[in-house]
Amino acid sequence: MHDGTASSMTAPPAVPGEAGLVPQRAGGLLRQRDFRLFWTGETISQLGDTMARVAMPLLAVLVLHASTFVVTLLTATAYLPWLLIGLPVGAWVDRLRCRPLMIACDLVAAVLYGSLPAAAWLGVLTIGQVVAVALLAGCADVFFGTAYQVYLPSIVTTGELVEGNAKLLGSASAAAIGGPGAAGLLAGTIGSAAALLANAISFLVSAACLLRIRGGGARIIPVPGSRTGIRREIAEGVRYVAGDPYLRPLTIWASLVNLGLTGYGALAVVFLVRTVGLGPGPAGLLLAASGAGGLLGALVARRIAARFGTARTLLLSALGALPFGLLIPLTGPGARLAFFVSGLLISASGVVAGSVILGSFRQTYCPPQLLGRITATMRFLLVGTNPLGALMAGGLGTWLGVRPALWIMIGIAVLSGALLLTRTFRGLKDLPAAPPGAAAATAQS
């Protein structure tokens, strides 16, 4: 399983004002056994997932002959669980051990995705089963994605969070380079089901890697007598995000970006296959540009943040790189394919660099005992907009056509960057390492 952004912290505090940026040790985090296992499992799981994100729409388009709206419905269904169970999952994760929960999610996902190629090879696959798998696997992803962000700070120090998130998102982006192309080639040769089988196997590998991790268990779990009701715990996370001067605007901005980019993603395969006229292999290779761009963003995020500051790097990602995504709807046959590659490459680099900064900021900034609930609250809004984005894209693509729908959805993501042009962020070099009242409270104590 995976998460797009990368979370009780027992590590030493971050350098004030630098949101966890410290000099990188020789060899980096990959020299640490637990992180190396975690990274390996996530990388292989990401490779399978990127193959599935292309293979499932191709399966719907080429095998089940689904309409544009039904294809986008698959994307919406996969993200719907964040709206249905996202908030209570945050409270549950704060009560549970993360590693066993993540292992269970990997095993459930392996069974679900493995059922699709089995049904396809038996000749009984239906669009109903594909939608059901997308929904149930999405539920597992909600649990895994929340636990993932809470778990990482238990196996790395606070000062290593930016490096850890950058490595995890970098490997995810590298997987996204090979995944779409491999999925397209497999779909064109032996069928889309093969790519989905690879995804099922990748979850088993992820579970095996998590089983071998020795550390990461020192979380402060509230005793039964100290627990409040689930509703009250959920409300604590919501109030924290809504009242914080940094988390609130960042959540709104990221939610709108996700809405627009999910709409693009839901239409991408349909656009390349039906509008541009490409086969599954070339379409998969073009979609790999997002992985290359994401890898670039992950590689440079830490260096740019160390030099210019985390807040300025976030603004550069939102206002400098993401607008290049407006080149994508200009794509056409022949030389005009360059619009797709360049637009996706540069905009994806900005998205991943921003994700590294935002994820590391949240893990450093938020109180450890609330991190699961804060993460779930933010992702309830961030990922909760994804079904809306996919359905909007499907409706617009059916009504106006796929190309105009791409203009609108990518335009929403680009224009949302204006929300960061406020006094809070414009004059800031680095995002804070602690909430505004925390420094004063520490000084008084």
Image (cartoon, rainbow, N blue to C red):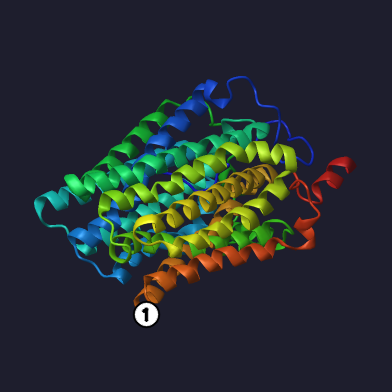
Displayed quadrant of residue 200: top left
Q: Is residue 417 left or right of residue 86?
A: right
Seen from the viewer's position, the closer of residues 339 and 222 is 339
The spot of residue 79 in percent (x, y) is 42, 60
Answer few, some or many: residues within 10 Å of disc 1's Cα (few below 14, many 20 plus, some between 14 and 19): few
Q: Is residue 247 left or right of residue 123?
A: right
The spot of residue 198 in percent (x, y) is 27, 40
Which residue is drawn at the image coordinates 31% and 65% (left, top)?
A: 71
Displayed quadrant of residue 439: top right
- In the picture shown, does residue 82 fall above or below 55? below
Residue 96 visible? The answer is no
Displayed quadrant of residue 65: bottom left
Which residue is drawn at the image coordinates 47% and 32% (left, top)?
A: 39
Which residue is drawn at the image coordinates 48% and 52% (left, top)?
A: 342
Q: Which residue is mark 1?
A: 399
Number of numbered discs overlaid on the protein picture: 1
Which residue is drawn at the image coordinates 37% and 80% (left, top)?
A: 399
The spot of residue 315 in percent (x, y) is 68, 54
Seen from the viewer's position, the closer of residues 26 and 160 is 26
Seen from the viewer's position, the closer of residues 239 and 400 is 400
Looking at the image, the residue that sits furthest to the right is: 444
At mark 1, the secondary structure is helix
Looking at the image, the residue that sits furthest to the left is: 122
Looking at the image, the residue that sits furthest to the front is: 335
